[in-house]
Image (spheres, grey):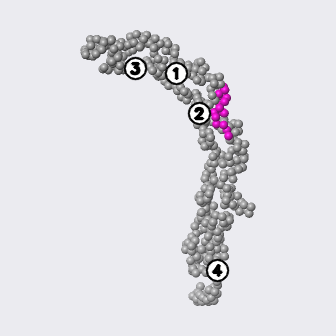
């Protein structure tokens, strides 16, 4: 193109611009009373909203674009493309399905990143009368906030009791049958929000806390009759058959009472003698029932040693207990650890005494232990010099004991 041609086109373009410029300046601003220069929002690449400047600072005007808002088209919020006077409240764009019952602060439950962020919504629920726990945190809002007759969700004045949502599960439960069993409609004692299916009744909070072997029993073992409410708590209500069938010993014939706790514990059904009037110690603990109760007597059995050991007492010859006048209170000399090797408790005279270490050292007559001899060890030649001037001194055993009852000096 020649130089004159370029010059002509330039003059022509200038003329067109001059002719149209006044018309453009007279056109009203489509964005309302926006006083910003066009270049603040628009770029040279294009005029349409799709070419809004990437570095446009929306936060400068009181509403920073974050999360999903940053990807939203301008016309989604500025429907008439008027930018002045636009409200910044969430409810200005987002329909309030809560009917104003929860206020207009949407940020309590929602975020700009995701309007249905369940984690955030669950945190918002913490501020209500029903914080979400366990499986409740993953439940859709509509599951609990069912639509009202107007088709809108209900959010206020909803009941908090479990049965308000779980009544169908309560009525349908068969193992056990909640309705027939008279179960309370307070689900919390047995069910947890974490897992509804694996329910476990807290028996420790009932009238019958479980201990020992009871903790391993299944519900059906005690509640096989379908009775859960008002169930008797006495042992025999479950163990009557055990009582009737017991033959070693025969509980009915022996007159045993039906209070099983007298002899048994929940840890071990075997008879616990420690709960009786005669706790077993020493060698007694290894005896069989038959060795003491061979006569069939269990109730009212005497607890004195001689009631079982009379034959042993009568047969003892070293020393002869009956002839020597030994008492029948066996525990005076014997213990339950070992019947042999008994030691007499010489409380009124110290033993061993000097060289005397055995009974026969002093009691020379095995048929009469009330008689004793001191003069075997305490000879007259040893004793007389110590008693010069002692009035009434006589060298014999009876007189020795009259002055020396404690084995010491007179």
Callout 4–callout 1 Cβ contact below 8 Å = no
Q: Which residue is mark 2?
A: 266
Badge 4: how crowded within 10 Å, few (<14), some, or many (20+)?
few
Q: Is residue 151 left or right of residue 13?
A: right
- Mark 4 or mark 1, which has the lower sequence index? 4
Alpha carbons under labels 2 and 3: distance apart: 45 Å
Magenta span = 230-245
Residue 50 seen in the current view: no
Give coordinates of residue 238: x percent, y percent.
Answer: 66, 33
Where residue 304 is drawn, which disc sits there? 1
User: Which of the pair 388/45 is nearer the observer?
Assistant: 388
User: Which of the pair 258/7 is nearer the observer?
Assistant: 258
User: Which of the pair 39/281 is nearer the observer?
Assistant: 281
Q: Which element is circle 2 on?
A: loop
**Residue at image location 61% in from the left, 51% down from the top:** 134
Badge 3: how crowded within 10 Å, few (<14), some, or many (20+)?
few
Badge 2: how crowded within 10 Å, few (<14), some, or many (20+)?
some
Alpha carbons under labels 1 and 2: distance apart: 30 Å
Nearer the viewer's eye, disc 4 or disc 1?
A: 1
């Amino acid at each position: 193109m020649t130089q004159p041609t370029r010059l002509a086109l330039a003059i022509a373009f200038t003329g067109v611009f001059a002719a149209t410029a006044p018309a453009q300046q007279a056109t009203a601003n489509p964005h309302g009373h926006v006083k910003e220069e066009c270049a603040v929002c628009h770029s040279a690449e294009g005029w349409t909203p799709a070419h809004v400047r990437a570095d446009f600072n929306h936060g400068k005007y009181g509403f920073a674009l974050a999360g999903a808002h940053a990807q939203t088209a301008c016309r989604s919020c500025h429907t008439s493309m008027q930018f002045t006077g636009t409200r910044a409240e969430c409810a200005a764009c987002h329909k309030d399905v809560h009917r104003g019952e929860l206020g207009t602060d949407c940020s309590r439950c929602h975020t700009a990143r995701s309007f249905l962020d369940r984690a955030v919504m669950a945190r918002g629920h913490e501020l209500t009368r029903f914080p979400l726990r366990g499986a409740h945190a993953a439940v859709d809002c509509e599951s609990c906030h069912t639509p009202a007759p107007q088709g809108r969700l209900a959010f206020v004045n909803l009941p908090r009791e479990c049965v308000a949502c779980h009544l169908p599960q309560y009525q349908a439960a068969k193992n056990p049958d909640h309705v027939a069993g008279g179960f309370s409609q307070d689900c919390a004692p047995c069910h947890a929000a974490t897992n509804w299916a694996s329910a476990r009744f807290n028996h420790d909070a009932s009238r019958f806390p479980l201990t020992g072997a009871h903790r391993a029993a299944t519900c059906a073992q005690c509640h096989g009759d379908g009775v859960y409410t008002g169930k008797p708590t006495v042992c025999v209500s479950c163990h009557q058959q055990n009582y009737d069938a017991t033959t070693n010993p025969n509980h009915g014939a022996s007159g045993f009472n039906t209070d099983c706790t007298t002899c048994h514990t929940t840890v071990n059904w075997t008879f616990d003698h420690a709960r009786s009037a005669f706790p077993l110690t020493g060698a007694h603990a290894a005896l069989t029932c038959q060795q003491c109760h061979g006569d069939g007597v269990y109730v009212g059995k005497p607890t004195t040693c001689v009631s079982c050991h009379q034959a042993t007492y009568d047969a003892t010859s070293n020393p002869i207990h009956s002839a020597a006048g030994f008492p029948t209170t066996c525990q005076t000399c014997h213990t339950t650890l070992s019947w042999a090797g008994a030691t007499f408790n010489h409380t009124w005279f110290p033993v061993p005494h000097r060289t005397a270490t055995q009974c026969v050292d002093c009691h020379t007559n095995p048929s009469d232990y009330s008689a004793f001899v001191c003069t075997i060890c305490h000879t007259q030649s040893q004793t007389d010099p110590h008693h010069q001037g002692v009035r009434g001194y006589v060298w014999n055993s009876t007189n020795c004991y009259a002055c020396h009852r404690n084995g010491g000096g007179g």
